[in-house]
Image (spheres, rainbow, N blue to C red):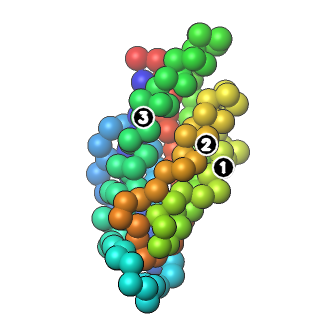
Amino acid sequence: MISIDSTQLRSCGSRQRVAGGLGRCALILALVGSASACSVSYHARNAEDYRQATRALLESKQSDFTTCYDGVLKATPDAKGTVAVSFVVEEDSGKITTPKSLPESTAPEALQACVVNGLNGLALDPPDARKGLATMTFDFTRG
């Protein structure tokens, strides 16, 4: 079972606590930058909307992460743990860039690599006018 839940949000130096949905996960999202003066349409989400949009985007990969976890379980039946990742959501394009597993991750390396690779190519649609810096933790347990 993969648990994903956003429990914290930090935006522009303030801190809000929000209730989670699917399980345990920390998503810390800081918005930086300003709106672009282009003719392309971008959202200027508030901090809560940005958190929810990013969480929904990551949840869209849950079946891929489950498939990867099932593969890891075949090789290591007792595999479990957390994968903490950080990444940037680029302004104007909404693309997730520079995803990386953090040292506090406890899941097997193969699972960490799967999550990091799964984040590549994702993008908020429509994109936001501001850059987002995020950290998210996924819990992987049999269940």
Horizontal and vertical percent for residue 27? 46, 54
What residue is at 43 percent from the left and 89 percent from the top? 37
Examine the rendered structure and indicate whether residue 61 appears above or below residue 18: above
* First of labels 1, 3 by sequence position: 3
Horizontal and vertical percent for residue 84? 58, 44
Q: Residue 25 versus residue 90: which sits nearer the camera? A: 90
Horizontal and vertical percent for residue 14? 42, 75
Crowd tier of the residue under label 2, counting other residues whose Cα lies within 10 Å: few below 14, some 14–19, many 20 or above = some
What residue is at 61 percent from the left and 41 percent from the top? 117
Give the farthest residue toward the bottom.
Answer: 37
Badge 1 vs badge 2, beta-carbon distance below 8 Å: yes
Q: Quadrant of the C terminus?
A: top left
Q: Quadrant of the N terminus?
A: top left
For the image, the number of numbered tags is: 3
Examine the rendered structure and indicate whether residue 62 appears above or below residue 89: above
Horizontal and vertical percent for residue 75? 65, 11
Examine the rendered structure and indicate whether residue 43 appears above or below residue 76: below
Query: Left or right: 110 with respect to 23?
Result: right
* Residue denoted by label 3: 62
Crowd tier of the residue under label 3, counting other residues whose Cα lies within 10 Å: few below 14, some 14–19, many 20 or above = some
Rendered image: mark on residue 100 = 1
Q: Considering the numbered disc 2 on the image, is that residue within a helix, a strand or a loop?
A: helix
Query: Left or right: 89 with respect to 62?
Result: right
Residue 108 shows in the view = yes
Give the alpha-carbon distance from disc 3 to disc 2, as whole Å.
13 Å
Query: Left or right: 124 with respect to 80?
Result: left
Rendered image: mark on residue 116 = 2
* First of labels 3, 2 by sequence position: 3
